[in-house]
Image (tube, rainbow, N blue to C red):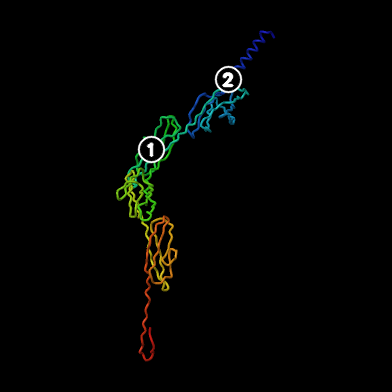
Amino acid sequence: MSARITVLFFILITACAITKAQECFASIPSGTQSVCHGSEFEIPVTLGGTAPFTFTYSINGSPQPPVFTYDSLFTLMSYPPSSNNVILLTGMQDATGCQGNVSGTMNIKRVSIFVQTFITPVSCSGTGIGTATVSVNNGGTPPYSYLWSTGSSSTQINVPIGIYVVTVTDSHGCTQETIADVVQSEPLSVTGIVTNPTCNHNDGSIDISIAGGSEPYETSWHFGPNTEDLINIGSGNYMLFVTDAHGCTGTYSTTVSTFDVTIQSSVAHCQTSLDVSVNGSIAPYTYLWSNGQTTEDISGLNNGWYTVTVTDAAGCTVNQSFLAYLTIPSATIGVSTNPCTGGLTA
């Protein structure tokens, strides 16, 4: 074979090989595609050569199962496993055994929209209007559109008590649905802790706690002050009026006691028992009776005056006396003149 024929044969063989390599290939588009959360994404795979084809690919570097197809344009569908995914063809082969070139890299961006609702409750009466406001915290691509179950397309709706659904849609058509539960305000609850004055001084106090309703609260005591708590007060009856931001009202009343001692008596087996009650001041208390006993209550007493001195934890003292007086039952003796029975009768 001459050199000219050999060169020509080599050129023909090389040209066929190049043509075959060009015909045997697989490619995907390069670029970035946004996919809504929970949705499948589609990637067109173009295949060249002799069908059927087998190609392989990876997601974020992780090999995926091989795909076998007779189609020269194959749609690859999958769920994005993470927020950002890189799809890359890693190899292909046609029916002739040709292993062609692969090309193209696609970035898949999963779009998630994070939505929050804010509620202003309906007033304490259970009637009237509350508000529900929706806000996109993160995710998606602005601008966003809103659609409430009421038909409103604004970010805030003014509605009565009830459950409302809002759907948020971003510029790519990705959606996120959430609910807003418009409820009634919790009833106002007003409680207080009373510290009674010592030694009948004006050093008592009332510490108020307010819950429920809607802040801010307005407070007013029956005798004028609009402070929430009271300090340096003496004994007496106190009442507080509370109004919340919606005009709902609540009240609190209490009695601030001075240091007071009362004694009650009871009789058993012809003897008296005395029971002491202490109001106000600061516990614990100590007791000293005029007969020398130091218990709170005393029993087995005969007629007479008994005085108790009660001392509180602050050293304040109060004296209280009581007259124990027993009424001795009386009996009469009579004479029966019945001649049959005779004798005495009581």
Residue identifier under label 2: 23
Q: Position of residue 163 (x, y in %)?
A: 39, 43
Label 1 sits on a secondary structure element that is: strand
Structural crowding at the residue carrying mark 2, measured as other residues with C-alpha within 10 Å and reported as few (<14), some (14–19) or many (≥20): some
What amino acid is found at the position of numbered circle 2 in the picture? Glu
Identify the residue at the far right of this view. Answer: 1
The residue nearer to you, when weighing 76 against 226, is 226
Drawn side of residue 212 relative to residue 6, left or right: left
Q: Do the residues labelled 2 and 1 touch (CB within 8 Å)?
A: no
Does 87 appear above or below 11? below
The quarter of the picture where residue 19 lies is: top right
Whichever of labels 2 and 1 marks the residue nearer the N terminus, that label is 2
2 or 1: mark nearer the eye: 1
The residue nearer to you, when weighing 137 against 87, is 137
What amino acid is found at the position of numbered circle 1 in the picture? Thr
Q: Where is residue 224 in the image (x, y as percent from the top left)?
A: 30, 48
The residue nearer to you, when weighing 251 against 33, is 251
Q: Position of residue 343 (x, y in %)?
A: 39, 88
Residue at 43%, 68% in the rendered image: 299
The residue nearer to you, when weighing 192 against 296, is 296
Quadrant for the N terminus, please.
top right
Drawn side of residue 319 relative to residue 29, left or right: left
Drawn side of residue 311 relative to residue 103, left or right: left
User: How far apart are the alpha carbons under marks 2 and 1?
Assistant: 59 Å
Does 44 appear above or below 239? above
Label 2 sits on a secondary structure element that is: helix
Residue identifier under label 1: 133
Does 137 appear above or below 212? above
